[in-house]
Amino acid sequence: MQAVKILAIVLIVVGLLALAYEGITYTTREKVLEVGPITATKETKKTIPLPPILGGAALVCGVVLLIAAGRP
């Protein structure tokens, strides 16, 4: 039962974070030009959108698991 409670808490935290941030943003660096010792790079920010229904579902599942784990 302890593992179920930990899983429930993790799901609640992940659900709240998904609802708060609505996406994961990361930066990639790409080498554009290299002439001798001189290099030019380009940074691109990309976002992976997280639908709010995903965060809500994780939150609800976590709460249901937490309630179910508390019952004998």
Image (tube, helix red, strand yellow):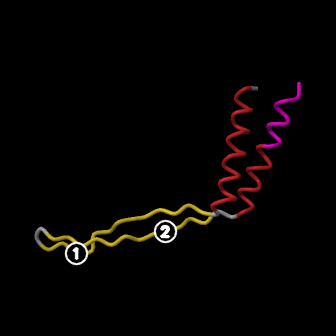
Residue underneath mark 1 = 33
Q: Where is mark 2, residue-wise?
A: 46
Amino acid identity at mark 1: Leu
Amino acid, disc 2: Lys
Q: Which residue range is magenta in the image?
A: 63-72
Residue 13 falls inside the magenta stretch = no
Q: Residue at x 71, y 39 (%)?
A: 9
- Quadrant housing the C terminus: top right
Looking at the picture, does residue 56 appear above or below residue 8? below
Mark 1: secondary structure: strand
Q: From the top left corner, tell me how far across and down residue 16 is, in percent.
A: 70, 52
Tell me residue 63's x, y (percent): 80, 43
Of all residues shown, which one is farthest toward the front? 20
Looking at the rendered structure, the secondary structure element under dot 2 is strand
Q: Is residue 2 above or below residue 62?
A: above
The image quadrant where one finds the N terminus is top right
Task: Give the percent coordinates (x, y) of residue 31.
Answer: 27, 69
Tell whether 61 sits left or right of 11: right
In this image, 67 relative to 17: left or right? right
